[in-house]
Image (cartoon, rainbow, N blue to C red):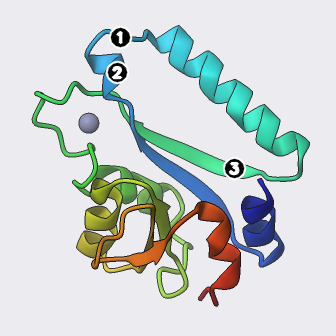
Amino acid sequence: MEVLKHVIELKYEIIIVTNQYLLGEGTINQAQYDKYTRRLVRLLASVGVEIRDIFYCPHARWVDCRCRKPSTGLFDQAIDKYPLIDLSTAFLVGDSICDVELAKAVGIPSFGVGLGYSGSIHLPSISDLCDHQLW
Ligand SMILES: [Zn+2]
């Protein structure tokens, strides 16, 4: 939470891009996803962290879609909806290789939480983001 507040205080806006293949694979249904997401957004808002938007891929892993990270579909949707996003100062934080690969594909820097992956700036924990100069 603190790290998200820090990012908000720096005047960034937060957009979530997330793979939700459990939907497409039938593990959870749309109502469960919606309920969980609303709870998350409300919880964050209650501590002053507003999420601007959420883009998600609902497809099963065996579906050849354009939106499942590391494909760029979710990112493209966000840019289409918010064309004023300044990509020169945007960055991506993720805990999966697919997040780092997405950031590389769209040409923005990324922080990989717990990944130890050379394609991103390594963060042992997301709270370590506060120690970095952001763009
Ligand atoms: Zn998809």
The residue at which mark 1 appears reads as 27
Q: Look at the picture and state if 68 lies above or below 119.
A: above
Give the alpha-carbon distance from disc 2 to disc 3, as whole Å: 22 Å
- Tell me the residue at 89%/47% (across/down): 47
Alpha carbon distance from label 3 to label 1: 25 Å
**Of label 2 and label 3, which has the lower sequence position?**
2
* Viewer-nearest residue: 41 or 85: 41
Name the residue: 78% across, 43% down: 44
Amino acid type shown at disc 3: Ile
Identify residue for label 2: 22
Q: Residue at x 55, y 85 (%)?
A: 89
- What quarter of the picture does the C terminus occupy? bottom right
Q: Nearer the viewer's eye, disc 2 or disc 3? A: 2
**In what quadrant does ligand 1 lie?**
top left
Tell me whether the residue at label 2 lies in contact with that at label 1, contact meaning CB atoms closer than 8 angstroms: yes
Identify the residue shown where x is 60% and y is 62%.
126
| Quadrant hosting residue 41 | top right
Secondary structure under tag 2 reads helix
In space, the residues marked 2 and 1 are separated at their CA atoms by 5 Å
Which label is found at residue 51?
3
Query: Residue 73, relative to residue 89: is it above or below?
Result: above
Q: Earlier in the sequence, mark 3 or mark 1?
A: 1
Q: Give the mark nearer the N terminus: 2 vs 1.
A: 2
Residue 29 % position (x, y): 43, 9
